[in-house]
Amino acid sequence: MGPVSEAAGLLFSEFNRLGVLESQFYENDDAFAGRPKLTPDPALKVRFMDAIARAEQFAHARLAQDPKDRDALFALTLSSGLQADYAALIEKRNIASLHFTKEASASAQELLAVCHDCYDALLATGFSKYIIGSMAAPVRWILRMGGLPSDKQGGIADLQTTAEYGHYLAPFARILLSIAYVREKDKPRAMQLLTSLHAEFPDNTLFPREIAHLQAPR
């Protein structure tokens, strides 16, 4: 869990620097597809991938001794999920991101099978379901054939569970939910989440910017 937490910290610092989680990039499919090309920090990527490699090495070593090791399964879920986020949101490599998303969802399902209240794992399954459920019908069909779930409302439900009961990932689930609510034209619920996040993390500059963006006249 140490190295994968290090990787998460590096990824979110890069998200913050590049403005990746600002909701205007996700308001609709056209805005997401047309988001500006980003210039990632190559040195940070090296550190990120090194932390991922160490997390996966330790996780697989523990799983070799105990296939139901919760920390190891959770670390693999996070590792694949973080790589999916980096590929899609920084590098705009959507196919590669879907590969990592499938791995994250598989590890999450293994974890939930041995730990029914490991609600953080539902973030991986929820994000996957929502994103794929938002795609065009032919694309959804192809991805379902490849074993990727497609259920937009089920994805939102998974994210809501993590947001309410998650231990590590509840704040991130609330950020993703606020983006989903913006996409679904549910501004009041998005505002409610962002306001609660701003109250909980007053030094984070993302939340007041997003609140101001949603409050601006259209």
Image (spheres, rainbow, N blue to C red):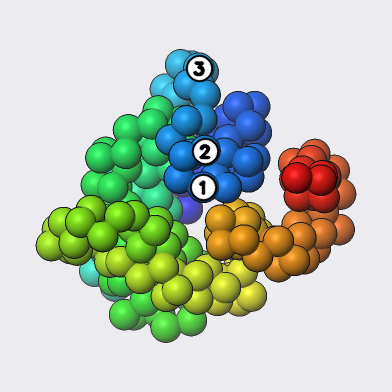
Precedes in sequence: disc 2 or disc 3? 2
Q: How many marks?
A: 3
Callout in the foreground (2, 3):
2
Which of 14/59 is in front?
Answer: 14
Q: Is residue 179 in sight in this rendering?
A: yes
- Given residues 50 and 40, the one toward you in this image is 40
Residue 58 locus on image (x, y percent): 33, 49
Mark 3 surroundings: few (<14), some (14-19) or many (≥20) residues within 10 A: few
Which residue appears at 86% of the width and 49% of the height?
202
Instruction: Using the image, determine if residue 119 lies above or below residue 60.
Output: below
Where's residue 23, x and y in %? Answer: 63, 45
Disc 3 and disc 1 in contact, CB within 8 angstroms: no
Q: Classify mark 1: residues with Cα within 10 Å, few (<14), some (14-19) or many (20+).
A: some
Q: Which residue is mark 1?
A: 28
Mark 2: which amino acid? Ala
* Secondary structure type for disc 3: loop
Q: Residue under label 2, please give it.
A: 31
* 124 sits left or right of 102 in the view: right
